[in-house]
Image: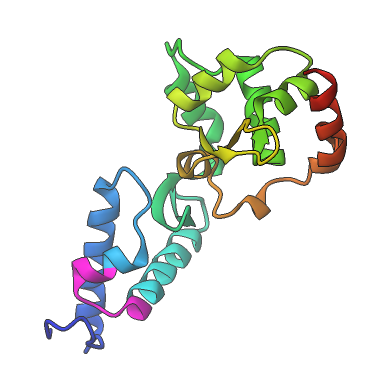
Amino acid sequence: MQNNGSQILANNAEAQFAKGALEAILMVAADPVSVDDLSKALDLRAGIVDQLLRELAAQYADSEFPRGFQLREVGGGWRFYSHPHYADIVRGFVTAGQKQQLSVQALETLAIIAYRQPITRAQISAIRGVDVDGVVRTLQIRGLVEQVGVTQDTGASLYQTTAYFMERMGLNSLDEMPDLAPYLPDNEILEEIEKEIK
């Protein structure tokens, strides 16, 4: 192989080695790894790496009985995930003895932020009907939401979900979330409510 990152795989043995190297990297990666980073690590063109990743993902999916894992493109990169077919078993294993799960209040607040972002704490409070300052701080500490600026008129902090939220939800973009937004008030109504509660 050349060292300029522009080579084409010469034979099947090189392709299999490259796939094995990709698997090895992704097995130890805590976060999704971008095609560019994998391309640099293997000294291969990004297009070749992308093709190899998609071949691996298809190979894992093409099985009579589901394997325990999937290779998925999520959050701007690639990562191994447990197969949804075994979700109940994995959930039981992961949550056994776990005491720090998100509360119902935190999950409700997270859902509101995810569907209406960017959004202020006052707007979240208006939807939930309760003060959410403590819950929003908890979500920030957990790395699920972040402050992304302030409103021009009031200077209130705006919040949105993070890349970590996307990764934990298994999403590549917010467009992949179920369409629940129509059940929440529109921005104009939220602005009116925010003015009323000040």
Of residue 27 and residue 33, the one placed in the foreground of this image is 33
Compared to residue 141, the image places residue 1 above or below, namely below
Instruction: Provide the residue span drawn in magenta.
Output: 39-48
Identify the image quadrant of residue 188. Answer: top right
Q: Is residue 177 left or right of residue 101?
A: right
State the image coordinates of residue 145 (x, y, percent, origin top left): 52, 33
Query: Where does residue 171 sit, x and y in percent of width and height?
Result: 56, 49
34 to 13, vertically: above or below: above
Q: Taking the image as drawn, is residue 68 in sight?
A: no
Q: Residue visible at 43% across and 66% down?
A: 59
Measured as percent of width and height from the top left, residue 111 is found at: 67, 32
Q: Is residue 56 visible?
A: yes
Chief SS of the magenta region: helix
Residue depicted at 35% across the width and 67% down the height:
35
State the residue at coordinates (45%, 49%). 67
Instruction: Check the image and name the residue furthest to the front.
Output: 153
Q: Is residue 43 magenta?
A: yes
